[in-house]
Amino acid sequence: MSSVRFTVTPTKAEDLPGLSDTSPDISSRPSAHVRFGSRESINRSDAVSEASAGVNTTVSGAGGNDTPDQCSVDQGDGNSKNSSVYINNSHGMDDDDFYDRNLALFEEEMDTRPKVSSLLNRLANYTNLTQGAKEHEEAESIGEKKKPSKSPQMGTFMGVYLPCLQNIFGVILFLRLTWVVGTAGVLQALCIVFICCCCTLLTAISMSAIATNGVVPAGGSYFMISRSLGPEFGGAVGICFYLGTTFAGAMYILGAIEIFLMYIVPQAAIFKGEGAAMLNNMRVYGSICLLLMSLLVFVGVKYVNKLASIFLACVIVSIVSIYVGALVSAFSKPSFPVCMLGNRTINSHFINDGECGKINVEIKYTMESYDSNATYLYENSTAGPTVVSTVASIVEEKTTDLWRAFCHSPELNTTCDEYFSSNNFSEIDGIPGLASGIISENLWSSYLSKGEVVEKSSLSSSHAAPPPAASHPYVFADITTSFTLLVGIFFPSVTGIMAGSNRSGDLKDAQRSIPIGTILAILTTSLVYLSSVVLFGACIEGVVLRDKFGDSVKGNLVVGTLAWPSPWVIVIGSFFSTCGAGLQSLTGAPRLLQAIAKDNIIPFLRVFGHGKANGEPTWALLLTALIAELGILIASLDLVAPILTMFFLMCYLFVNLACALQTLLRTPNWRPRFSYYHWSLSFLGMTICLALMFISSWYYAIIAMVIATMIYKYIEYHGAEKEWGDGIRGLSLSAARYALLRLEEGPPHTKNWRPQLLVLLKLDEDAHVKSPRLLTFASQLKAGKGLTIVGTVVPGNFLQTYGEALAAEQTLKHLMDKERVKGFVQCIVAQKPREGISHMIQSSGLGGMKPNTVVMGWPHAWRQSEDPQSWKTFINTVRVTTAAHLALLVPKNISLFPSNNEPSTEGYIDVWWIVHDGGMLMLLPFLLRQHKVWRKCRMRIFTVAQMEDNSIQMKKDLATFLYHLRIEAEVEVVEMHNSDISAYTYERTLMMEQRSQMLRQMRLSKSDREKEAQLVKDRNSMLRLTSIGSDDDDDTDGGERDRPVSSSTEHHRRVQMTWTKEKTAQYRATHSGCSTPEGFRDMLSIRPDHSNVRRMHTAVKLNEVIVNKSHDARLVLLNMPGPPKNPEGDENYMEFLEVLTEGLERVLLVRGGGSEVITIYS
């Protein structure tokens, strides 16, 4: 094996051979490679250094001779190679050895199909992108040098498990879970917690499957949903997730302010009192707190991240103190007495004197001493006198604070509340302890209406009294409770499961850490919630549990009464944990909005994709703060919680839907590493989410769905051109396949017939559509909501004209977008146009979605056309559509048809029903009138009666038929009497045959053929009726303007010309160079064919009647006669159609496909 030794010496670029000033600038190419003959290569990231380096080599090998040779600089983005000095081994390879000899077969494809080693190298060096950045597929192809970034090192515990714990545990656990247990009872509370935890667990399983199905860039949750369900669903759910996160921030702030004002510093309240005053305090302090948090997030997220560990420690310490306190209560219960009047709970804020009773009895003792018989007695002595003492007691009765609250007077003889008078006060333990058996009373629910008193059912009382007044010192229910309400309030305490996937960019192995960490966090929190429900029910008195704000236990936080060693552990811990959760929400929500804005699927959010120089989303943070302020202005934790419940549930619903769809559709790319999932679990999770939405608040659920639907339709309307390989696209493919197979089961019923259009358009040399109004007309027929395929034929060979075909396809797509036609484009490359059209008619469509109607334009100026193939192609297309049993629509004078922007005007659409064609003539006007351009037009139907027909009866039958068809139209029967063939018909037929004979027999040059044709036409020029505004008008006039017209010619246009011997001799003298004068002489002596005369007679007579009746119609529809079976009469067929439609402005020739398209039955 030979060895290669080389040195690279920097020199000037101009010193390199082959790199002169005129050489291509290879320094601008991003990925240049210097390839070596010994299969060793140097890849330089700096292209400039390649262009400015001199290469000197010394090769030692088997031959032992130094052989300088040439090298090649391969430019990565092109196929050209610039010769230069290259290093070769001793075997002396030629230029074909630039590529690996083992891959020589593929060397021509290396630019577009890289080697496997190159691909694997790029994949191995893949780094996670930030959310909202360019697609990672695009980023891989960018050859720019990237700054080295620190590789992610976070594991499952620190990267997923702990962040999920911190986000799941929150304000609801500390402020509302005890109230949920007391109101719903232990059993129903367990049910609520279990349902909510099952919802998040099933969602986490679906999320794990999606997260392990490929690399998930940072920002995970939104990325997963949008890439799995498409931009429409992704944008809608992304906005819902953003709103949920934003309102969660508002909820956490409200929770922190509630803790601050009620349990830490009650004296800080600005507005004194209950109810509205408290709400105003929440609004003021909440707005201040939101402002401070927003400023902290704006200054730097690093400070928020540094505080995260402190907040997490607060949560863990608080939860541990609850468990320790519950265990301690079994041995020494804490002292939190609750004052009861009968079975009603008393608000301890009214007991300022500490007395739970009606009257405070005070006994005063006085001692009096006297000398009995002047004798003082001394104990145990007979020497001294005896002193006798007497003790006197004085009883004083004083009313308590509770007496004054119920009786409104401190006097004992005043009138008091009836319930107060008939019941006595008692004290019970607020925390009976774990061993007290109180759980038996707390098993069952105790739902209250707003204003009801919290009562203990096991205590006896007199209920004969009227309902309590609001001024009495009871503990009242502040809202009406129900099972559904509690579900909506509790659910936010199980959200936060996306925290791990949101950090996927920081994880060492995201596909392993996200499933394990998320599911373990959910199981941990579920165990904590379920055990907390049981502990609260087993340790705390029911009336205290139902006391939301702890009024019965001297204003303490209820869960704090159970904590060990002091309630302040929970109060301080919960305050900091809620503040931390609020900061996390205000940090995450703007980044989520920024990611949605950078994806550019919602145009009006584009401004929120910008931020500070370091990428911080400034504008998104501002919008987030404004939306969070709306939640704070609500000022009630219990009212904000159901709002974010809706948005999170909708997000989780679509995560489950995405997993279920991908699983059921069996997408080839669906290969998750996490295998413990099933589509039934995803559907169960989706069902639970949907049920919880309507259980918690049906009107909030409807509002959330309306918001998501509006965003979905907005994105769909603006057309988010994103191809993310989403599941909805896969669902569409599966649904389309299923529908096509269903359509294939049998032919469509007449009631389901609708025009499936194949619109044939012709492009000029510059790839511009010649008759764009054809597509306009097709769009006006789209009231049938059928299939539309726009096709064209590109002449040439497919291998050479593939690029032209793509350009033609893009041109047609742009025209379809302009005309707002929904459909498909088919571009066929063929050597001959007629063969291409035939192939298109045969192969267009799929299964039951094949076109049944062909729309094509009338050939422009077919008489003067230098290429007879134009009208021959037209007739061939008519024959092909007839053979394929397809309907055919030929608009004549298409340039005069109205555009979609023209205002609707009144007029008539006239239908000339000459032969029955399956009802196409009846259906087409009805479809056209659904469009705004033709809406004001009325419909008239004409039919032709012969001499043997009863025209009166025909009119009645036709009116009855239209009545059963539910079509409103005026009916008229036109009688055509038998008449002799007129001289005009005979002359017109003769002119037609002479022209055909001339073109067949005379092979003249282009100019001579035009003059000969004009000469024959001039023979009967006075009889010729010029089509009003016909398609060939402009061409005819233009052709005549190009030739000088003498005054004698103008004179002959006014009178009938006859051919004389003098004229013939004059023509022969001036055209002596004619190649076949004998043929021309034979042409002048022919007699018209009798069958042609009869056909011309029909055309002339029908044209006279149609022009007479429909000269003012906006559109005339009439049957299109079929082409002759003998191809020799094709040109005569074109002449018949011209005569039939002369004098009409807009004509639609209709030829049915042989099947019924309209029915009288329902």
Image (spheres, rainbow, N blue to C red):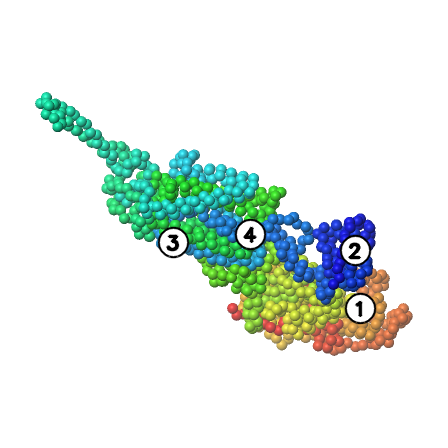
SS state under label 3? helix
**Mark 2 highlights which residue?**
57
Residue 195 is at least partly visible in this image: yes
Compared with 502, 797 (above or below) is below
Alpha carbons under labels 4 and 3: distance apart: 35 Å
Placement of the N terminus among the 4 image quadrants: bottom right
Alpha carbons under labels 1 and 4: distance apart: 86 Å
Alpha carbons under labels 2 and 3: distance apart: 80 Å
Residue 285 point in image, percent of width and height: 46, 38
Pick whichever of labels 4 and 3 is earlier in the sequence. 3
Tags 1 and 2 touching, CB below 8 Å: no
* Nearer to us: label 1 or label 4: 4
SS state under label 1? helix
* Three-letter code for the amino acid on which mark 4 is drawn: Leu
**Mark 3 highlights which residue?**
190
Residue 874 is at least partly visible in this image: no
Q: Which is nearer the eye, 381 or 518?
A: 381
Q: Which is nearer the eye, 274 or 952?
A: 274
Residue 870 point in image, percent of width and height: 75, 68
**Mark 4 highlights which residue?**
507
Left or right relative to 1034: residue 598: left
Tags 3 and 1 touching, CB below 8 Å: no
